[in-house]
Image (cartoon, grey):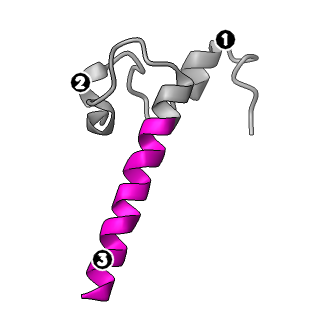
Amino acid sequence: MSDPVRHGQTSSEAADTDGQSPDKADDVDDDHLSDLEDGAGCTEIWEHLSERRADADARSAELAEE
């Protein structure tokens, strides 16, 4: 594997593996974060995703019992 820094790429360019600009917000699948307020921090996001996962697990368990 070659070192992207040696080839004149910045770290953000090196992290962009699909050739698309990381600034393209239109292509980002962020529907699962739509319930969060702007400016939410890591803790709020983690709690939100954990709650969604727990709800999904509970629904799956209910369906399995039927």
Q: Using the rendered view, name the quadrant where residue 23 is placed.
A: top left
Q: From mark 3 to mark 2, how far is it between C-alphas? A: 35 Å
- For residue 60, which numbered disc appears in the image? none
Residue highlighted by disc 3:
62
Residue 64 placed where, x, y %?
32, 84
Describe residue 19's horizontal placement relative to residue 38 as left or right: right
Magenta-colored span: 47-66
Mark 1 or mark 3, which is nearer to you?
3
Which of the two labelled residues, at mark 2 and mark 1, occupies the earlier sequence position?
A: 1
- The quarter of the image holding the N terminus is top right
Q: Residue at x 26, y 30 (%)?
A: 34
Badge 1 element: loop
Q: Amino acid at mark 3?
A: Glu
- For residue 8, which numbered disc appears in the image? 1
Residue 6 placed where, x, y %?
76, 17
Q: From mark 2 to mark 1, how far is it between C-alphas? A: 28 Å
Which of the two labelled residues, at mark 1 and mark 3, occupies the earlier sequence position?
A: 1
